Structure formats: structure tokens, C-alpha cells
Image (cartoon, rainbow, N blue to C red):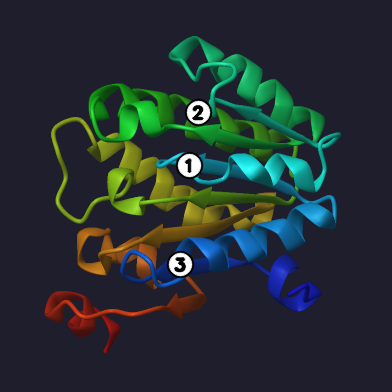
Amino acid sequence: LPRKDLLHAGFRCWVTGESGWGKSSAVALIVEQVAAQKNQVLILDMHGEYGNLWVVDPAHIERAGYGSMEVRLDLIPWCLDVLRSGKSLTLDLSHWSDIDPESLDVFLLKLLRGLYELRRREPMWTLVVVEEAQTLIPQTQAQGQAENIRIFLGMITGGRKYGLQFILTSQRQSLVDINAISSCNVRLFMRVSETKDWLLMK
């Protein structure tokens, strides 16, 4: 990166690897390059790791969470206004990801549906980064997750013509919906030792 043929012809990237082996660092490197080119990025940050991205271009990157404005369900209109303006946005979702997955599911469903509707009306190149993708598109659904999975798979497969690009990450490949991984045209593998995850790489 940066490569126009890679970034603008439909960029759907899968990144996996065990904790401590560079997965988040690789994603941060890609995102920093994309943001530095004034391309739009939306980061769904499940563990609060991307708060420093803001310093890459403070005038064009908004953030919520990270000890500042709390991410709540009623913040979705503000999020969509930021994305409509062309700015990038990084959201710290760590307060939900481990202790309140039901609220996280509701927030993601409304935000992603709103983003998809926005980009269908107003196409624009937008890179969506989903950390710990098994929380959004798990291979085994929890109750109430079917709608999230359906919408997100539709965005991955049909969103390119509206400008939507994706990076999906997870430590455990076997926990993420296989249809989402199969849709990725770039795949980065760090250290992987679990047998189930290796079998999916064949």
C-alpha cells in the first residue's frame, strides 16, 4: 500500500493471528496509510486499540469513546453525520464487546444499516474495519444475530459498487462466518496454531 488497483477495485481483507503476533499492528499500518490519503475509514474497535489513529489527521478523523464522548445507541445519528461529511470515524466499543453483547448487536445493526443506506444514496469510498469479527458475524449465531449477519454479508458482497471496502480481523478464524472470509480477496495470516483454524486455510 498504497496501490490504487488494490484499494479502489474492491478491497476486502481478512487478517487473522494469535494475540501478540502483529495482527492489530498490520491493520493499523494499512489504516494509517488509507487515512493519510484522505480516504474515509470507519473503525469498529472492540478493544479500544485505535484511539491514536486520530493523530494521523485530526482535522479529518473523529472519535468517540477512548475516555471522551461515550458511545451510546443515541450516538448513531451523529456517527452517520460524520460519515456523510466525508470524515473518518473510530468508535471505541470495548465497554460493550465483552460485558453487554446484546447492546453491541443493536448498535451495530442500526449503524451498519444506516451506513449501507447512506452509501447507496451517496456512494463514497469507505473502508470499514471490524476488529474481532466473530462478535459481529459469528459462525455460530447467538439469538438475535441473524439480521446483523444478513446485512453485513450483503454489504461485503454488494457494497463495493457503492464504495464500501472492508478489513475483518479475528484471533480465531473458525469462529467467524465462513461466507464473510470467503468474500475477502486479500488474506493476511500471522501465527496460527489451532487445528480448526488451520483446516480453514486449506
What label does residue 111 carry, if any?
2
Disc 2 on helix, strand or loop?
helix
Residue 88 placement: quadrant: top right
Compared across the picture, whether 129 is left or right of 40 comes to left
Q: Position of residue 34 (x, y in %)?
A: 74, 59
> Sequence-wise, which precedes: disc 2 or disc 1?
1
Residue denoted by label 1: 45
Q: Position of residue 184 (x, y in %)?
A: 47, 70
Real-space CA distance between mark 3 and mark 2, rounded to the nearest whole angstrom? 25 Å
Identify the residue under disc 3: 23
* Helix, strand or loop at mark 3: helix
Instruction: Return the disc, 3 or 2, that comes first in the chain's sequence.
Output: 3
Gap in angstroms between the C-alphas marked 3 and 1: 13 Å
Number of residues whose C-alpha sits closer than 10 Å to that of mark 2, classed few (under 14), some (14–19) or many (20 or more) = some
Q: Marks 2 and 1: which is nearer the front? A: 1
Mark 1 falls on what kind of element? strand
Query: With 31 as the anchor, is 93 left or right in this view?
Result: left
The image position of residue 115, as x and y in percent, is 59, 34
Q: Is residue 183 visible?
A: no
Q: Amino acid at mark 3?
A: Lys
Please tell me how crowded label 1 is: few (under 14), some (14-19), or many (20+) other residues with Cα within 10 Å: many
Image quadrant where residue 54 sits: top right
Can you tell which of label 3 and label 2 is closer to the viewer? Answer: 3
Instruction: Name the quarter where the C terminus is drawn.
Output: bottom left
Q: Residue, x 85% and y 57% (percent of image)?
A: 37
Say which residue appears at 42% left-offset and 31% top-offset: 108
Look at label 2 and name its amino acid. Leu
- Mark 3 crowd level (few <14, some 14–19, many ≥20, 10 Å Cα): many
Tell me which label, 3 or 1, sits earlier in the chain: 3
